Each structure stands twice: as C-alpha cells, then as structure tokens.
Image (spheres, helix red, strand yellow):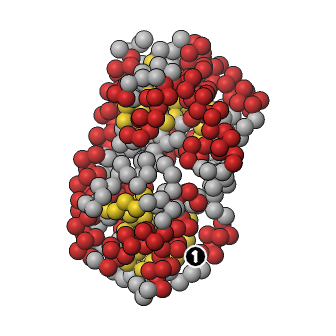
Amino acid sequence: MGSRPRLVWLVSEDWYFRLHFLHWAEAARDAGFDVHLIARTGERGPEAASEIRDAGFAVHEIDLRRSGLNPFDDLRARRQILRLYRDLAPDIVQHVAIKPVLHGQWAARRLGIQARVNLIPGLGYVFSSRTAKARLLRPMVTSALGRALSREDGIMVLNEDDRTFLAVLAGVPNESVSVVPGIGVDVERFHSTPEPDGSVTIALVARMLRDKGVIETVEAVRGLSAAGKLVRLRLIGGPDPGNPESISEDRLKAWGDLPYVDYVGPVVDVASEWAKAHIACLPSQYREGLPTSLSEAAACGRPIVTTDTPGCRDVVRDGETGYLVPPSDTAALLVALDRLVSDPELRQRMGAAARADAEARFSRQAVLGQVIALYRRLLR
C-alpha cells in the first residue's frame, strides 16, 4: 500500500452519491485517501457526474441499475466491476446498498481485496413492501445478501434494528456491525430559524412514495383543516418512477390543487424549506435507514412526527423532540400533529431539544469521525 491508500466507492447512481455521500468522499480525501467512484451516470442528467469530477474525484462509468431483475444485465455489471477493480487496484472498497454489495463483494473477494466496507443504508423495497413481488424476492435477496456478508468485518448500517438483522444474517456478533447515525448533517447550513408567520405549516420531505406515508399525511391534514385548524402541508420531493411504490405526478398535482396542500416537488435548498415550516412529518409505513430529511429537520429546530418503525424511531426521542405514532394509523397521526399545531410553546420546546440532539448525534463531525476510523481499522 502506497502513501495514499486508494479508496474505491461502488454506488448504483452518480446522483445518489452526489446527494448523500460526496462529503464522505471529501472527508476521506482530507484524511489522506485517493478516492474514486464507480457508478452509473446520467440517469438524472450530466450535472451529478460533473459536480463529482469538479470536486476532484475520478468517475468510472458502469451500467449498474438499482432496479430490474435481468440476470444478463447483472452479469454484465459484475464483469465491469471486476475489470475496474483489477485496473484500479483499490486498497479498500466502499459498497453502498444491496446491489452494489452483492456485486462488489463478489469482485473484491475474487481479487483478494481484504478491506471491504458494506453499507446498507436501508433494507428498502424488497424488505419493507407487502406487495407480491416483494414477498417473492425477499427470500432470494436475503439468501444472496447473507452469502455476500458472511463473516464480514466491515458491515455498516444506520440504525440498531438493521444492525441486529444483518448481524444474524452475516453470522457475526452485533458489535461487529458498525452503526453510524445517518449520513451526517451540516449543522451550520441546517440551523435553527424562527417560526414563520401565518398558518402552521407541516413539511414532508421525501421521495413521493406510498410507503413514506404521504397519503396518510394528506388525510391527516385534511382532517385538521376540516376541524377549522389553520394548517398547510408542503410536499417536498418528486415521484420515483423506478420504485413500484411511487405516487404519480398527476395525483401529486391534484393534491396541490387542494386549499391546504402545496405540492412543491424536488428542491435543491432543503434548509430554506425547513425555515418555511413549523413541523416535520414523515410517517413511513415500514423501515428506513435513518431518514436524512428528519435529521436535517431536527438540526433546523423543527419538532418531528414520525412512525415507530426501524430508522424513524432512531431519530426521535418520543415526547422530547417529537412524537412517534404507529405506522398506517391516520387517526394517531392526526392527534400527534394536532398537539403541535395547537401549541406554539410545545413546538418551540421540542424544536430546541431536537436541535441539541442533532448537534450531538447527527452532525457531520460525529458521523465522519466514525467512518474514517473504520477505514483505518480495516486497512490495519
């Protein structure tokens, strides 16, 4: 290994890396690593790959689709990964999400790359959805993931439920699976601001998927409005056509025509959206990794209403920084939101506690220190 160990990231899409992990790569570079990215590029335009390259990182293109079940596509992607790993000769590899873990582990083991970090940021559609397709795929994916992670020392997750699940699957002690509390929030950019004037605004920041609890949130706000509460809901994010749970653009626009709903769509400056809101809401029906939108809302001093599900429950201290409600329970969601809508002092008290919690647990400094320490331990 040379003076600058080479770290190669394998991620399905360039936009996903840019959105969530570019600051991880920058931290690794600052810590002395030579960082490369392998990803599919261009799905959402050329800007993501250009920004990554402008930040000083080499981008190596492959055709690895995050969805799809064509075995020939997966075989072709594996061969591309194997060739790039052979050419780049990484000292350490970082695989992110299930497909990159499956294919990257196969290639890294074949080439004898010993330092391997496998981050499962969330168990996703196959493990959380109740559709027939998901139930059919779940045992196959579970088996494949178990083989890929068997006896691995570099497994990384974002919450305690996933730690327990993957430790059993991989056959390792719980403490062998690293838990990082999210991807790390820039607590200087995401900072507390005073509540805005006007109607109490509830913001839901997420991909517009059914299993994010978007429908339940619209119904809960409908109930609050019908009860005479001056309240608005802002839906911030777009549909995800590659996900079977995606809500159509037409339905989202129809909701936006309601007097108490604004369909905003995708935004770049999420911090400014939290400045326009009083309350954060994400009633995810199943499991998350650790929702970035909620940790950012906490950093902005906004109280949170979310569900008592894996990942979501790791963000909120129930009764202190927000409320946890059962999944798919519109009535309970309405009650929790109503408490915050009706009580400005409660909102401010919980918001201040959420900000302090975010500084202690979710800041980039806290998260990236753990990540770089894991890289160095595995290299040793």
Please name the residue shown 48% across and 69% down the image.
330
Label 1 neighbour load within 10 Å: few <14, some 14-19, many 20+: some
In this picture, is 307 found above or below 173?
Answer: below
Residue 299 in view in this figure: no
**Split into 4 quadrants, where in the image is the N terminus?**
top left
Please name the residue shown 32% across and 47% down the image.
362
Residue 141 is situated, as x and y percent measured from the top left of the image, at 62, 33
Residue 139 is situated, as x and y percent measured from the top left of the image, at 63, 34
**Is 175 positioned to the left or the right of 135 in the image?**
left
**Split into 4 quadrants, where in the image is the C terminus?**
top left
Q: How many marks?
A: 1
Residue 271 is situated, as x and y percent measured from the top left of the image, at 39, 60
**Is 157 positioned to the left or the right of 147 in the image?**
left
Instruction: Give the quarter of the image for residue 321.
Output: bottom left
**Residue holding disc 1:** 256
Instruction: Give the quarter of the image for residue 172.
Output: top left
Residue pushed farthest bottom?
A: 228
In this picture, is 278 found above or below 162?
Answer: below
Q: Amino acid at mark 1?
A: Gly
Q: Secondary structure at mark 1?
A: helix
In this picture, is 144 found above or below 288?
Answer: above
Residue 348 in view in this figure: yes
Please name the residue shown 27% across and 76% down the image.
344
Please name the residue shown 39% across and 81% down the image.
199
Residue 153 is situated, as x and y percent measured from the top left of the image, at 42, 21
